[in-house]
Amino acid sequence: MSSRTVVIGVDSSTQSTKAAVIDAVTGEQLAVGRAPHDVTGEAGARESDPEVWWRALGDAVAAGLKESGLPARSVTGIAVAGQQHGLVVLDRSGRPLRPALLWNDTRSAPQAAALTAELGGPDAWTARTGSVPVASITASKWQWLRENDPEAAKGAVGVRLPHDFLTERLAGVAATDPGDASGTGWYATATGAYDPELLDLLGLDPALLPEVASTGATRIGSLTDAAAEALGLPAGIAVAAGTGDNMSAAVGLGLGGAGLLDHPVLSLGTSGVVFAASRTRSTAPALSGFAAADGTYLPLACTLNCTLAVDKVAALLGLHREDTAPGGEAVLLPYLDGERTPDLPTASGLLTGLRHDTTPQQLLGAAYEGAAVTVLRALDTLLRACGLDPDAPEVAARPLRLIGGGARGRGWVETVRRLSGRPLVIPAGGELVALGAAALAASAAGGGDPVALATSWGAGETGSQLDPVERDLETWQRVTSVLDRASEPLLGG
């Protein structure tokens, strides 16, 4: 076993770091080390100390290697996939000047609206970047920082995304990739570079930003002596540019130019995310028209309220998350943290249709339905952006890949199945973000296309496949009717 060649794929998410030790030849997952993060804030604020991410990375790598039983010398490469959009500002020594603003920090909603108007509206933004500024986008957070913590903004000598920060600690090189960069709001997917006019609009010196590698699999450097000592890994191993977590999950599923194109994925986690790898660059204002890690595009829609919101409703009702039933007449839009899609950053939850005979299980089911309908409506928009008609029989028959923590829960799977009417594929691999990062690391170490490599590993192989059931259009129409008719004052938007 000690003769194996392995790579480490890192998933640095909102809540934790996972470091997967992956056989570089077969793609077999040998071990996964884990370490938690701390998230602080209230009233829309969500922040983390980036130094916690670095310490968690070291702890997760150590735990993964220990579990694998392999010596550190077996490792030939490492890559980080990180939570998107977070804003990290650095001092001259590369240390964070303040806690990072996370993707789900909604305080920057006013700045997002102002930026949208200042450039000339949503279409002007999507023509350049593929995305309209919302509270999640890094550009909005930078504007918030300039207005609310001007000393940190003025003192910054480096502006990074979470994965950029960690990659720079690994290799000593300030680098990013097109995928994660496309979520900043200052990278133009139309040109494949930072947009000078947008940087000027934001008052952001391009010298503060990392260089953009050609792909997430590009070898941007080697593990430094200091990083090697901190992580217990050999100095000089390959460090890939890495990417954002959604882009890495796409690689892990074998989605991209050398794999599956225009095949939709639904991720059920803290957020609900739908995406597909495509050769079509999206300019739909309702989507984030991201770049992918491999040179294609990754149109994506993200809702803020998914598994955590439904779990909160279950806790309020004193129910286990699986103790659920279809919602009956009740409609519950569980927008407990505001909402990103639709863009309602100050929204709160909305319950209507309550009757004397409504049961707690139905209320929980209504929370599932509200969250699922929200993200499935975004799926229809995504398919149209890929040039597909979501109602066409051949498109409706295309399997929907279901990933994330919710994909392991009966309540989520059956709700999505019932409301989508689509066949579902639930891949066998559990740590797809880390697996995709491992493919980027293996490509950086040994060459080759990361999507082709992940496909050769059997990435995204079916763990289970569920045939479609008749679509529950009655529930769909009831929920969408409430969503469409609810005024902004009702939703708090």
Image: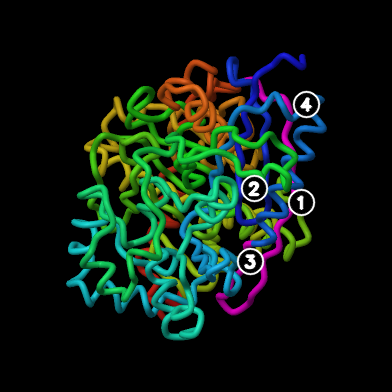
> Label 3 is placed on what type of residue?
Ser
The kind of residue on which mark 2 rests is: Ala
**Could you say which is closer to the camera, residue 151 or residue 357?**
151
Q: Can I make out residue 369 in this image?
A: no
Residue at x 42% of width, y 76% of height: 493
First in sequence, mark 3 or 2: give its number.
3
- Tell me residue 396's x, y (percent): 34, 31
Residue at mark 1: 320
Asked if the residue at tag 3 contacts the one at tag 1, i.e. Cβ–Cβ closer than 8 Å, the answer is: no
**Picture quadrant of residue 428:** top right
Q: Earlier in the sequence, mark 1 or mark 3?
A: 3
Can you tell which mark lies on residue 325?
Answer: 2
> Which residue is pictured at 64% across the width and 75% down the height?
41
Which residue lies at the image location 59% right of the left edge and 68% below the top edge? Answer: 96
Compare marks 3 and 4 and give the one earlier in the sequence.
3
Q: Amino acid at mark 4?
A: Pro
Which residue is disc 3 drawn over? Answer: 48
Mark 1 and mark 3: Cα distance apart in space:
30 Å
